[in-house]
């Protein structure tokens, strides 16, 4: 790591620590009641309550987020690939998808529960529904963005449609796929939590509703932090994969 | 003895039709190119020079006339004997320079080990030795265009078609690339058709210059450039050079 990067990372860490410190002093100096805002230390202590079954709830929420997300990536990319091969199919299905995208996915929650009861499955579907569109839309766009002159170059060599796809289109679309995946990573978290709010018997979102009744704000804070950490982890994994697969210059900022 | 030309174009005409209106892109194009020539196609935008180049590449159809490439001594295979260079280098960002050069070899299914060696030689020929493993973004615009020229040569085509390849470069780099191109042309011994709107560039590079005019598109002139090789930059100030450029300026109505 060079000096500039080191400096950037340490500044980022410092700003986060400053936020926690500001939080601490705000609560302590302002004598804020615990049920309004717990201190960082009280928030951490919420982890010690065995009743809250943190490990199980973290696992459930993670499965929902990662499950819905991976499903959305696989299906979104696959459908975009199919569309890039069949213009007819794209012209029929794509407008439909754009219209469906207008539906606020959250509004589908009660319906999903009616159809599939509640539990991990419907919450995976909710996460999927909310992060599927950005992936298919950016992938389809990436597959379309091929320089016409480059196609001419391949045509003079009598290259096949498959060669264009595998050597030019698909690697060229990768940066777009990743930009969609990054947007979707954040949405997937929101989808899973909304799903848990609407109907579930496990997960961090469910836990938040439970402790809301007893006004255990510290546990709510802890749950929010954990949800954020799961989302952050997903985002970092996607970033890492992007670094591995996409040449620096080709990455979309 | 009259040698059989490598390229024979006679009375070629191309019309674009869009929503009922017609646009004459090329007309009265008639000229021959000998094997090993570097022919400049020069003219303003809309004169059909790029269209004509794409007709030669087999990418465009045409309404009338005939196009024949190849001779008994130089048979021509349209899928293997065309190398193309465009205004933009069009290198694939995710491939190293050498792998960019190898793209046509991959598409044609040529033996890769031999092609890889050839790619190294070609990169040396275009002045990019030592840059094989870099990515395009690590090279300047001029260097990227050199790599694009190496890519056009990788499958050893007989004909190189260049569409304003130095149009996006700054003036000094462009002059340098002109001299480099002449050197590469002489070493690689290829027939080159070079499209440009630069009048001095057309004369400086060409063994022959074909002038196309716009509105309506037609071929206005076709003359041999009697300047010795290797060409040097000081030739641009000699009288003969000036006569050639004035001749083109006159045809384009700029004098």
Image: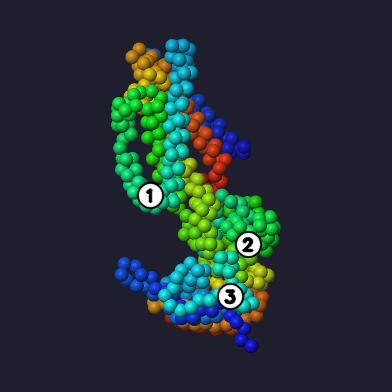
The percent position of residue B58, horizontal first and vertical second, equals 50, 69
Q: Does residue A244 appear in this view?
A: yes
Quadrant where the C terminus of chain B is found in the figure: bottom left
Q: Is the residue B19 above or below the residue A168 in the image?
A: below
- Disc 1 to disc 3, C-alpha distance: 42 Å
The one nearer the camera, A249 or B187, is B187
> What is the quadrant of residue A97 in the picture?
top left
Q: Which mark is residue B70?
A: 3
Q: Chain of mark 3?
A: B
Circle nearer the viewer, 3 or 2 = 3
Q: Residue at x 40, y 27 (%)?
A: A121
Residue located beneath label 1 in the image: A90
Residue B246 visible to an observer of this rendering: no
Q: Residues within 10 Å of mark 1 (few under 14, many from 20)?
A: some
Q: Is residue B213 left or right of residue B193?
A: left
Tell me which residue sits at (43%, 78%) in the image: B64
Of mark 3 and mark 2, the one earlier in the sequence is: 3
Read off the residue under disc 2: B154
Residue B223, relative to residue A229: is it above or below?
A: below
Q: Is residue A212 left or right of residue B134?
A: left
In-front residue for pair A26/B185 = B185
Q: Between B205 and A160, which is closer to the camera in this rendering? A: A160
Which residue is drawn at the image coordinates 33% and 34% (left, top)?
A105
* Picture coordinates of residue A57, whole percent (x, y): 44, 20
Q: CA distance from mark 2 to mark 1?
A: 37 Å
Q: What element does badge 1 sit on?
A: helix
Say which element carries label 2: loop
The local secondary structure at tag 3 comes to loop
Same chain? Circles 1 and 3:
no
């Amino acid at each position: 790591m060079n000096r500039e990067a080191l400096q950037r990372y340490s500044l980022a860490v410092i700003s986060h620590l400053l936020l926690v410190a500001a939080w601490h002093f705000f609560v302590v100096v302002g004598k804020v009641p615990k049920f309004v805002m717990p201190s960082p230390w009280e928030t951490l202590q919420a982890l010690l309550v065995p009743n809250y079954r943190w490990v199980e709830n973290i696992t459930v929420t993670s499965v929902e987020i990662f499950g819905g997300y991976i499903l959305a990536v696989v299906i979104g990319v696959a459908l975009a690939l199919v569309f890039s091969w069949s213009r007819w199919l794209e012209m029929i299905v794509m407008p439909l998808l754009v219209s469906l995208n207008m539906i606020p996915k959250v509004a589908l929650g009660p319906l999903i529960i009616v159809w599939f009861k509640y539990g991990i499955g419907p919450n995976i579907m909710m996460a999927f529904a909310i992060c599927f569109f950005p992936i298919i839309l950016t992938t389809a766009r990436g597959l379309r963005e091929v320089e016409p002159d480059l196609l001419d170059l391949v045509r003079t060599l009598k290259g096949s449609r498959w060669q264009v796809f595998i050597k030019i289109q698909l690697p060229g679309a990768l940066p777009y796929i990743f930009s969609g995946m990054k947007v979707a990573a954040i949405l997937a978290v929101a989808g899973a939590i909304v799903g848990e709010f609407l109907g579930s018997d496990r997960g961090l979102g469910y836990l938040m509703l439970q402790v809301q009744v007893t006004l255990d704000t510290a546990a709510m804070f802890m749950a929010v932090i954990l949800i954020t950490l799961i989302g952050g982890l997903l985002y970092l994994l996607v970033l890492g994969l992007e670094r591995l697969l996409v040449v620096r210059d080709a990455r979309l900022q | 003895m009259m040698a059989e030309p490598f390229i024979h174009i006679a009375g070629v005409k191309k019309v674009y039709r869009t929503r009922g209106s017609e646009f004459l892109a090329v007309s009265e194009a008639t000229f021959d190119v000998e094997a090993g020539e570097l022919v400049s196609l020069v003219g303003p935008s809309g004169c059909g020079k790029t269209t004509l180049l794409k007709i030669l590449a087999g990418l465009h159809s045409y309404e009338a006339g005939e196009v024949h490439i190849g001779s008994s001594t130089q048979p021509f295979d349209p899928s293997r004997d065309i190398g193309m260079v465009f205004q933009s280098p069009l290198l694939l960002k995710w491939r190293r320079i050498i792998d960019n050069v190898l793209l046509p070899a991959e598409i044609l299914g040529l033996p890769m080990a031999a092609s890889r060696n050839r790619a190294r030689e070609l990169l040396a020929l275009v002045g990019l030795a030592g840059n094989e493993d870099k990515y395009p973004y690590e090279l300047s615009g001029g260097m990227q265009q050199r790599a694009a020229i190496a890519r056009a040569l990788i499958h050893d085509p007989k004909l190189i078609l260049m569409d304003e390849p130095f149009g996006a470069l700054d003036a000094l780099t462009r002059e340098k690339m002109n001299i480099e191109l002449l050197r590469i042309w002489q070493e690689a011994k290829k027939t080159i058709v070079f499209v440009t709107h630069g009048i001095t560039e057309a004369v400086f590079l060409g063994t022959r210059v074909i002038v196309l005019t716009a509105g309506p598109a037609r071929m206005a002139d076709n003359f041999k450039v009697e300047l010795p090789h290797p060409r040097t930059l000081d030739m641009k100030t000699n009288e003969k050079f000036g006569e050639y450029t004035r001749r083109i300026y006159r045809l384009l109505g700029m004098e």
